[in-house]
Image: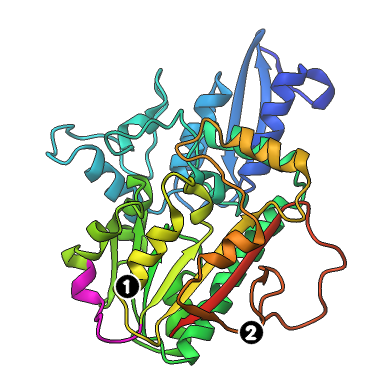
């Protein structure tokens, strides 16, 4: 029996691209293609022998990716996903998180909450991919790579937005805010809101809100594990439904200042869905001294080709990307006074050090305001 470990020149372009993507997306595994007696298979071996699942072998690179996705999940998330997918406990004994088995059908369907079609790109999971996370699926990665094709520094932009959130939360905590509502949470990525807030105010209260059930499962399993932290399902297009949620009202005291966080979420709200009215509904529920934090992609300074490609990348996603002008984003702060430095590039907002040499291809603005 002969085994041929193929190098880059020995495989077709499509197979080589798939293999390259797997190797880039899962650095914790050594991954290669090999031929045995004329049949091709893909092998993934975990580099650390002490980290759970060790070896995967399959003839289908798509199935290998699905299994690697699952192998990267923390046990708490795997257990929560299993409960969400089988709330009545009817599925019986399947493999444990550390014992993923290869099947003819990608087994990821067995741990996805009902009603989620992983063939449809999700902005939350695409963002997770930009941040280097593993909680995404082939459709998410394909759409995300299309966006990255015109914004080569797109991952850096995503991280700049994440760091903006951390700086903004810490700023709010230093200015009297002890409780936060994170609207459009996304897949948990450390540092999360409660970590940033509690670095300044131990015991700060945080409620994470997202309409994607996969995000909510992750948030409940990984974030809502301490007193004063909750994770709820909710669509920001229904602000009154979120504000009436019992879990939220157990954590948030609306007689005291609240930090409202709309970080990289309002650009998934169409004009017809009226983002200004959504923000206003939440703003009306909180007292003076509360703060509003927004980050949003902008058409100002972003090239038309970049705008068109990103809009196309998100066209078939569960929410389309909507570019707005700087003035339109500033209008979302109605009733709030912007704090210095105002509405700026997320990478520059209250950042120490020298400014970036040149702006990114995708312009991303962020700011914070205090309610009058």
Secondary element under disc 2, as helix, strand or loop, is loop
Local crowd size for mark 1, using a 10 Å CA cut-off: few (<14), some (14–19), many (≥20) = few
Residue at point 38%, 66% (across, down): 280
Q: Are marks 2 and 1 in contact (CB under 8 Å)?
A: no
| Lateral position of residue 288 relative to residue 350, left or right | left
Secondary structure mainly formed by the magenta segment: loop
Residue 96, above or below 217: above
| Lateral position of residue 118 relative to residue 8, left or right | left
Residue 110, above or below 214: above
Q: Nearer the viewer, residue 62 or 102?
A: 62
Q: Which circle's residue, 2 or 1, is located before the other in the chain? A: 1
Secondary element under disc 1, as helix, strand or loop, is helix
Please name which of the two marks, 2 or 1, marks the residue nearer to the observer.
Answer: 1
Which residue in the protein does label 2 denote? 340
Which residue in the protein does label 1 denote? 284
Quadrant containing the C terminus in the rendered view = bottom left
| Lateral position of residue 270 relative to residue 215, left or right | right
Residue 372, above or below 156: below
Task: Spot the residue most to the top.
Answer: 38
């Amino acid at each position: 029996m002969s085994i041929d470990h193929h190098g880059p020149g020995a495989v077709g372009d499509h197979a080589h691209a798939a293999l390259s993507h797997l190797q880039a997306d899962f650095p914790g595994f050594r991954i290669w293609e090999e031929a045995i007696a004329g049949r091709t298979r893909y092998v993934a071996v975990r580099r650390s022998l002490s980290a759970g699942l060790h070896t995967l072998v399959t003839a289908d690179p798509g199935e290998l990716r699905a299994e690697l996705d699952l192998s990267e999940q923390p046990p708490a998330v795997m257990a929560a996903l299993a409960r969400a997918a089988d709330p009545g406990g009817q599925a019986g004994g399947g493999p444990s998180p550390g014992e993923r088995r290869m099947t003819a059908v990608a087994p990821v369907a067995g741990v996805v909450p009902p009603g989620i079609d992983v063939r449809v790109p999700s902005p939350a999971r695409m963002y997770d991919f930009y941040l280097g996370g593993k909680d995404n699926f082939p459709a998410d990665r394909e759409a995300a790579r299309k966006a990255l094709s015109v914004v080569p520094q797109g991952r850096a932009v995503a991280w700049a937005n994440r760091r903006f959130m951390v700086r903004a939360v810490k700023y709010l905590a230093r200015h009297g805010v002890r409780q936060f509502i994170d609207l459009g949470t996304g897949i948990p990525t450390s540092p999360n809101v409660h970590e940033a807030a509690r670095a300044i105010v131990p015991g700060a209260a945080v409620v994470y809100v997202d309409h994607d059930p996969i995000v909510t499962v992750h948030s409940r399993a990984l974030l809502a594990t301490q007193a004063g932290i909750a994770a709820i399902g909710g669509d920001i297009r229904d602000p009154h439904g979120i504000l009436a949620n019992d879990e939220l009202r157990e954590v948030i005291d609306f007689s005291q200042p609240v930090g409202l966080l709309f970080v990289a979420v309002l650009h998934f709200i169409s004009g017809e869905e009226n983002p200004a009215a959504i923000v206003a509904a939440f703003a009306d529920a909180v007292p003076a001294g509360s703060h509003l934090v927004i980050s949003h992609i902008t058409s100002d300074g972003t090239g038309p080709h970049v705008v068109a490609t990103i809009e196309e990348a998100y066209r078939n996603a569960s929410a389309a990307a909507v570019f707005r002008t700087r003035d339109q984003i500033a209008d979302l702060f109605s009733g709030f006074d912007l704090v210095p430095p105002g509405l700026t590039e997320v990478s520059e907002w209250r950042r120490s050090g020298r400014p970036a040499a040149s702006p990114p291809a995708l312009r991303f603005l962020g700011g914070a305001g205090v309610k009058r």
